[in-house]
Image (cartoon, rainbow, N blue to C red):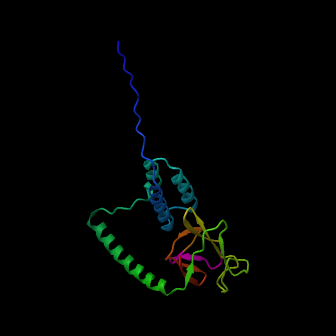
Amino acid sequence: MTSSFEFPIHAVPARLSDADRDRAVGVLSEGVAQGRLSHDTFLRRMELALAARSADELAALTADLGAERRPGVGGRLVGAVGEASAFVERLRRAWHIQKLPPLMLPEPGPAPLRIGREPGNGLRLSHDTVSRWHAELTARHGVWLLRDLGSTNGTTVNGRRVMGTAVVRAGDMVGFGRMSFRLTTR
């Protein structure tokens, strides 16, 4: 008598690469920059992205951040006009940003870089529109976060007021009160 043993075959999903995780974190960062995710949601999803074991888990974290689609001819026309307007605005902003003084992103460290008028800040800005403790810049998991510390005249990133925390990167225009800078890495 011959017996055959059947072993169950389990498909093992491919291991996620760092590039896969980086792409997911990039999509999440864009979601924060566009105001589609809160800071807390971003941080939670980023933790989940770093712990994800499959591509499906990563896809679930970014599924609600996909591109919006406009059906029909009218939607395409509105989209084309919007893209042309956005191009003109990006061109104007790029021209303006290049004229701004550069602000070099510091080396990431354990403590955030505090920005304000007080001498105890890592970056001291002596201007009437800058609060004593205006904002702080922190690097987390390779992403730079700029947080307003309840300043009177506000903190902006690319012309948009920061409500809580915003993701920033080299090339962005940041403002503290009426002082504006262009972020740079060199």
User: Which SS does the magenta portion mostly show?
Assistant: loop
Q: Is residue 109 above or below residue 62?
A: below
Which residue: 29% across, 68% down? 76
Residue 11 coordinates in the image, percent (x, y)? 40, 38
Residue 108 coordinates in the image, percent (x, y)? 60, 68
Residue 122 coordinates in the image, percent (x, y)? 68, 77
State which region is magenta.
150-160
Residue 80's image quarter?
bottom left
Q: Is residue 61 above or below residue 103?
A: above
Given residues 97 and 177, the one toward you in this image is 97
Residue 45 coordinates in the image, percent (x, y)? 53, 55
Residue 105's image quarter?
bottom right
| Count of numbered circles in the view | 0
Left or right of 186? Residue 83 is: left
Which residue: 30% across, 62% down? 71
Q: Quadrant of the N terminus?
A: top left
Given residues 103 and 128, the one toward you in this image is 103
Residue 144's image quarter?
bottom right
Asked if residue 85 lies in the magenta stretch, the reply is no
Left or right of 76? Residue 104 is: right
Which residue: 48% across, 83% down? 97
Query: Which residue, as the protein is rendered here, is positioned at the far left?
Result: 73
Given residues 54 and 186, the one toward you in this image is 186
